[in-house]
């Protein structure tokens, strides 16, 4: 099990921006060359830049799996967001501080054991799952994995090539479903991820139940989704997973 790193051991290293690609709308994929210490899929690094004469750092999940050396960050700009707007302005060759080592407990090792793993994300919250899904660990620990990605518009369902290659590799063990809240989405589900669970539409798609008996749940993204999901899952007898008391739900709140 990964242990927390003492704060005194964390340090900033210089990262060199390889690419900073605008994927769609206000969603970017930042690729950084940096000397990354070993990390667990699902962990985050702090990115740091000087903004208005001040050093500003915020946490960002690593999208790349641990065996891939380039740090990949999926981020969106936030209106008047101090760091995200500065990150969006980065160009190839620029320098960005990368906190090392990566940290956090939103990892497969920390998730409750079960037959099925349900990964729920809103927006950029899909990042840590894209890292985990490309490790062996998740497939050794769970028989079936369901990725549910909630976005506003279809074009925000990014990394479809990665998702397709995971489908190819794991076949019926892996289900990926996009939930689009502001557009028609014939290939997936329409509405919020919470609605897909509440209505039963999600389980109609997977063909099996999201239950306390067989399911472990990870939630990553905004607080509103996490709280709504926790309330909804409580009606199915699912509760927060703690080290001292096994439960069903592990969360990572971005904002
Ligand atoms: C563990 C962890 C991992 C994270 N990983 C990622 C990641 O991989 N990608 C990513 O984009 N962000 C991630 N975040 C959020 C990120 O750290 C910043 O909070 C975000 O980029 C905004 O920073 P800022 O300086 O631009 O905004 P600030 O100037 O700090 O303004 C923050 C304001 O924007 C709101 N806000 C923050 N994030 C969002 C958002 N995504 N959408 C709408 N409003 C928002 C806050 O509620 C607050 O009101 C993560 C947060 C945590 C705690």
Image (tube, rainbow, N blue to C red):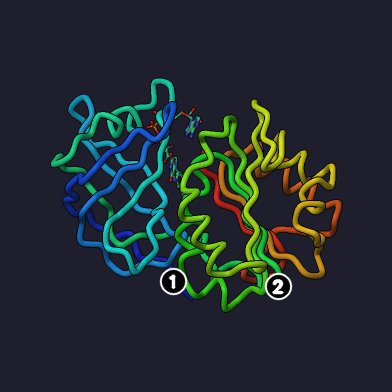
**Element carrying mark 1:** loop
Q: Residues within 10 Å of mark 1 (few under 14, many from 20)?
A: few
The answer to whether residue 242 of the structure is visible from this angle is no
Ligand 1 has an atom within 8 Å of the beta carbon of the residue at disc 2 = no
Count the marks. Answer: 2
Instruction: Indicate which label's residue lies in the foreground, 1 or 2.
Output: 2
* Extreme-top residue of the structure: 80
Q: What residue appears at the point 39 percent right and 21 percent down from the top-left corner?
A: 80
Is residue 163 visible in the rendered structure shown here? yes
Residue carrying label 1: 3
Specify the farthest residue to the left: 93
Q: Going 37% across and 58% down the picture, which residue do you hit?
A: 64
Neighbourhood count class around disc 2 (C-alpha, 10 Å): few under 14, some 14–19, many 20 upward:
some
Q: Secondary structure at mark 2?
A: loop
Q: CA distance from mark 1 to mark 2?
A: 22 Å
User: Where residue 137 sits in the image (x, y, percent)?
Assistant: 51, 75
Residue 114, disc: 2
Q: Please state if 92 lies on the left or on the right of 75 as rendered.
A: left
Answer with the quadrant where ligand 1 appears in the image: top left
Mark positioned earlier in the residue sequence (1 or 2): 1
Image disc number at residue 250: none
Residue 131 percent location from the top left of the image: 45, 60
**Which image quadrant for residue 109?**
bottom right
For image coordinates 43% across by 59% down, the residue present is 43
The answer to which of 251 and 172 lies nearer the viewer is: 172
Residue drawn 28% across the image and 53% down it: 99
In x, y percent, where is residue 84? 35, 32
Labels 1 and 2 touching (C-beta < 8 A):
no
Please indicate whether residue 166 sits to the left or right of residue 111 in the image: left
Residue 79 vs residue 137, the one in the foreground = 137
x, y percent for residue 150: 62, 40
């Amino acid at each position: 099990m990964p242990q927390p790193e003492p704060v005194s051991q964390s340090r900033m290293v210089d990262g060199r921006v390889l690419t900073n690609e605008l994927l769609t709308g206000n969603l970017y994929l930042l690729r950084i060359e940096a000397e990354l210490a070993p990390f667990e899929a699902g962990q985050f690094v702090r990115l740091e830049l000087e903004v208005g004469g001040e050093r500003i750092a915020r946490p960002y999940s690593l999208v790349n799996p641990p065996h891939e050396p380039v740090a990949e960050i999926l981020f969106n700009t936030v209106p008047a967001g101090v760091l995200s707007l500065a990150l969006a302005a980065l160009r190839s060759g620029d320098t960005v501080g990368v906190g090392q080592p990566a940290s956090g407990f939103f990892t497969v090792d920390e998730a409750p054991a079960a037959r099925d793993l349900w990964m729920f994300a809103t927006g950029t919250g899909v990042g840590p799952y894209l890292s985990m899904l490309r490790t062996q660990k998740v497939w050794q620990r769970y028989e079936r994995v369901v990725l549910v990605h909630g976005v506003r518009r279809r074009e925000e369902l990014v990394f479809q090539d990665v998702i397709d290659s995971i489908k190819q590799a794991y076949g019926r063990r892996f289900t990926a479903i996009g939930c689009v809240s502001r557009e028609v989405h014939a290939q997936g589900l329409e509405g919020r991820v919470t609605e897909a669970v509440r209505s039963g539409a999600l389980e109609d798609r997977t063909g099996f139940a999201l239950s306390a008996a067989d399911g472990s749940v990870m939630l990553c993204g905004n607080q509103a989704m996490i709280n709504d999901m926790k309330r909804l899952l409580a009606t199915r007898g699912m509760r927060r997973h703690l080290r001292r008391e096994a439960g069903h739900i592990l969360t990572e709140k971005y904002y």
